Amino acid sequence: MYLFFFLSRFLSFVDLLGTTYSASTLATGYGAHIAQPLLRKSVEGREDTLTEEEAHKIIENSMRVLYYRDARSINKVSSFHKLPFLPC
């Protein structure tokens, strides 16, 4: 059971009040209003077959839409790469 917990995939959100939410795509703030529909359209139903390159393209498209919609944003985006899992 302990090993299954660490090897299973999940994506969840917890706010400061302890409210939890879990879904195949998550966005917060302004992105929850603008980017979340784009993410749902691109990802839902394909969670198991989505490649890392496709995921980066989806995120870049979402960030581009957010940049065009927000008057106070800059066009710099930082991305990350998944690190290997290291158990404690």
Image (spheres, rainbow, N blue to C red):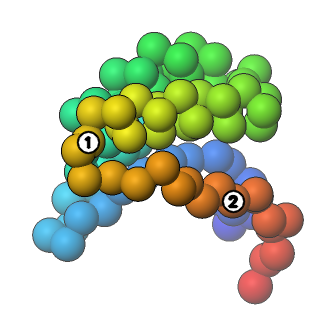
Q: Where 48 falls versus 21 (above or below)?
A: above
Residue 79 location (% of width, % of height): 64, 56
User: Crowding near pointer 2: few (<14 within 10 Å), some, many (20+)?
Assistant: few
Q: Quadrant of residue 41?
A: top left
Q: Where 87 falls versus 72 (above or below)?
A: below
Q: Secondary structure at mark 2?
A: loop
Between 2 and 41, the one lying in front of the other is: 41
Residue 26 location (% of width, % of height): 40, 42
Residue 85 location (% of width, % of height): 81, 67
Between 59 and 71, the one lying in front of the other is: 71
Residue 58 location (% of width, % of height): 59, 28
Q: Where 15 falls versus 29 (above or below)?
A: below
Q: Residue 51 vs residue 16: left or right?
A: right
Residue annotated with mark 1: 70
Residue that appears at 24% across and 64% down: 15
User: Crowding near pointer 1: few (<14 within 10 Å), some, many (20+)?
Assistant: few
Residue 6 in view, yes or no: yes
Q: Which quarter of the figure is the N terminus placed in?
A: bottom right
Residue that appears at 26% across and 42% down: 70
Residue that appears at 66% across and 30% down: 57
Q: Residue 43 vs residue 31: left or right?
A: right
Residue that appears at 78% across and 33% down: 53
Numbered circle sitting on residue 80:
2
Q: Secondary structure at mark 1?
A: loop
**Counting residues from the N terminus, which is met first, the one under dot 2 or under dot 1?**
1
The amino acid on which the numbered mark 1 sits, given as a three-letter code, is Asp
Distance of label 2 from label 1 (alpha carbons) = 23 Å
